[in-house]
Amino acid sequence: MKLSVNQKEYLTDSEQLTVSRLLNEIQSPTAGVAVAVNNKVVRKVDWESTLLADGDHITVITAVCGG
């Protein structure tokens, strides 16, 4: 499966990849993170059940402190 993660190509052999599993594969933290799939925000409670498809565009945003 070929995905775009934060505008970079990501290839995986996983056939049923969820948002949660993708974050694990790319070693992304899960606290303070927001995820959008094809420009639609995915609620954290839905990460386990949201399946990704070939060609999806995923944006992972990590909150930072400061001003």
Image: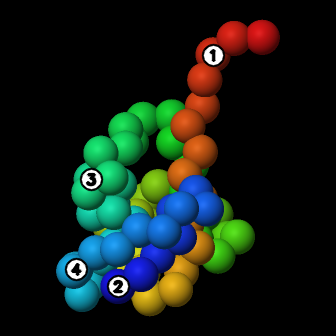
Closer to viewer: mark 4 or mark 1: 4
Which dot marks residue 14? 4
CB atoms of marks 3 and 4 within 8 Å: no
Closer to viewer: mark 2 or mark 1: 2
Q: Mark 3: few, some, or many residues within 10 Å (few <14, many ≥20)?
A: few
* Secondary structure found at label 3: helix
The type of residue carrying mark 3 is: Asn
When the figure is inspected, residue 2 is found, relative to residue 25, above or below; the finding is below
Side of 12 relative to 32 (left or right)? left
Which dot marks residue 1? 2
Q: Position of residue 42 (x, y in %)?
A: 56, 65
Which one is earlier in the sequence, the residue at label 3 or at label 4?
A: 4
Residue on which the image places disc 1? 65
The Cα atoms of the two marked residues, 2 and 3, are separated by 16 Å
CB atoms of marks 2 and 4 within 8 Å: yes
Which one is earlier in the sequence, the residue at label 2 or at label 3?
A: 2
Residue 35: quarter of image: bottom right
Q: Residue at x 51, y 34 (%)?
A: 32
Q: Residue at x 30, y 45 (%)?
A: 27
The Cα atoms of the two marked residues, 2 and 4, are separated by 7 Å
Which one is earlier in the sequence, the residue at label 4 or at label 1?
A: 4
The type of residue carrying mark 2 is: Met
The Cα atoms of the two marked residues, 4 and 1, are separated by 34 Å
* Secondary structure found at label 2: loop
Query: Which residue is at the far top?
Result: 67
The type of residue carrying mark 4 is: Ser
Q: Residue at x 27, y 53 (%)?
A: 24
- Is 44 or 39 nearer to us in this picture? 39
When the figure is inspected, residue 45 is found, relative to residue 50, above or below; the finding is above
* Secondary structure found at label 1: loop
- Is 31 or 24 nearer to us in this picture? 24
